[in-house]
Amino acid sequence: MNSKGLAVLSCCLLFFVWAECQQEKPSKATAKKVTKELKAKENKFSRAVGKKVQQGASKFLKKGQAKPTMTIPSQKQPSPLSILTRAVAKGQFQKVTDTLTLKAGETLDLRCKGKSVKWKYPPYLEDDDTEYRLRVKYFQKHSQLIVVNTTAADTGEYSCWSFQCYDSECRDGEDKPGKTYIFFTDPLELFVPTENYYEVIQMRTNHPALLPCQVTNPLAKVTLHREFPPEKVVVDGIDISYDVKRGFMIHRPRPSHAGSLFCMANMNGVRQISTKYMLIYVNYPSSVPKPVVRASTASFHIGDNFNVTCTVFGEPEIAVDFTWEYPGQQIGRPPYVREHTDLVRQGGQVQQESKSIFYIDEARVVDDGLYSCIAENLQGSTTVSTRVHLVQATLAPRKAKSG
C-alpha cells in the first residue's frame, strides 16, 4: 500500500475513534435522567426486599404473638424526694414512711425542708402542759420538730409543708407536704389515753360515724363490743370497717347501732378496753327546709283580723323549728302562733307537712309591714317574707248646711 492509501486509512480510523468517544460521553440532561431512573429502581428494589423480609419473619412468629417493634428506651424520671426526714443519729437522717413505730420515751426528731415551714401534730401536744416537751426550731433551709419524753398519748399524724410569702400574701409552695403516722408503743397503754370516760357520738342518716379508739401499737388485735346487752359487734368491712390509724367506722348508721359501745385491744395476752362511746341515732335531714309564706290578706283595716301561714314540706320525722319576725315586735307586741304537722301524699310520696300560723287580732297601725318566717332544721335555715299593708280609712264628705 502506498503512502497515500495509508494516510487515508489513518484518517478513517481517527474519525471512527472520535465518534465512539462522543457516544460514550452523554449530555448532562441524559445523565440526570439516567440517575433518576436508577434511584427509582433502587427504591423499588429496597421496598420489595423489605416486604419479603417482613413476610419471612412473620412465618417464624407464633399464632397470636405480637410483632416485635423497635422502642427507644426512655430515661426514667427520679421520684420526688420527701421533704420530711427523721434524725436517727448524729448526722444521719432517714426518709419517713407512711407509718413509724417508736417506743414511748424515745425522742422524736423530724426535719422538714423549706425556707418557711408549717407543722401539724396531734392536738394533745398543743396543750400548755406539753410545751416543755415539744420544741419547733426554724432555720434558713429547714425546720426541726423535737418531742422529748414521748408518751403513748403522742400517737398520731405528724405532717409539714412549706409555703412562700410575697409581701403580706402567703401561699403553699411547690413542695408536696410530708406526713407520717407515728405509733408510740407502751405495754401498759394499748389505747391512746383520753380524759373522757364516756364520749357521745351522734349518728346521722346517710353519714358515716367514727368511733376513734386509736391504738398505740399497730400489731394489737382490736374488736368492737356492745355494753348492753353484752355482745361482740360483727365487723364485716362493709357496714362497719376498722382502720388502725382512726378506729371503727360505721358507714351506714341505723337505729340498731345506737347504744353504748367500746373497743377491746389484745396484745401479748394483755387486754384493755377503750373509752365507752354512747351512740345516738338522729334522723338527719337531707337538705335545709324550703318554706312558703302566705298571708290571708294583702291589706287590712284597723281592727281587722288576719293571719300569715308558713308551710314546709319535707321528710317524715324531721323536726322543723319556726321563728317569726314581725312589725309589732318593735313595741313588744307578743306573738300568737299555732304549729302542727301532718303526713300528706304529694307527688306520689308521703311527706311531712309542717305549718306555723301567725295570728293578728284587732290589727293596729303598728301591724303594717314585713312578716318573715325562719324555718330551720339540722341542716340549716331558710327565711321567706311577705308584706301586709294598712288601708287608711277615708272620712265621708260632710253635707253642706242649708240656709
Image (cartoon, rainbow, N blue to C red):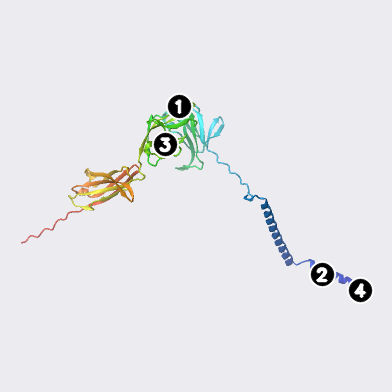
Q: Residue at x 31, y 49 (%)?
A: 345
Q: Please state which amino acid type lies under the numbered disc 1.
A: Arg
Choose the circle earlier in sequence order: 2 or 1: 2
Contact check, label 2 and label 1, Cβ < 8 Å: no
Task: Classify 387 as above or below 193.
Answer: below
Choose the circle earlier in sequence order: 2 or 3: 2
Q: For mark 4, what is the residue?
A: 5
Choose the circle earlier in sequence order: 2 or 4: 4
Q: For mark 2, what is the residue?
A: 19
Choose the circle earlier in sequence order: 3 or 4: 4
Q: Please state which amino acid type lies under the numbered disc 3.
A: Leu
Choose the circle earlier in sequence order: 3 or 1: 3
Which label was assigned to residue 210?
3
Q: Quadrant of residue 241?
A: top left
Quadrant for the C terminus, please: bottom left
Q: Nearer the viewer, residue 306 or 399?
A: 306
Depth-wise, is mark 2 or mark 1 nearer the camera? 1
Q: For mark 1, what is the residue?
A: 271
Q: Please state which amino acid type lies under the numbered disc 2.
A: Ala
Cα–Cα gap, marks 2 and 1 = 118 Å
What kind of element bears circle 4? helix
Q: Residue furthest left?
A: 403
Q: Please state which amino acid type lies under the numbered disc 4.
A: Gly
Q: Residue 340: x percent and y percent?
A: 26, 44
Choose the circle earlier in sequence order: 1 or 4: 4
| Image side of residue 171 versus residue 40, left or right | left
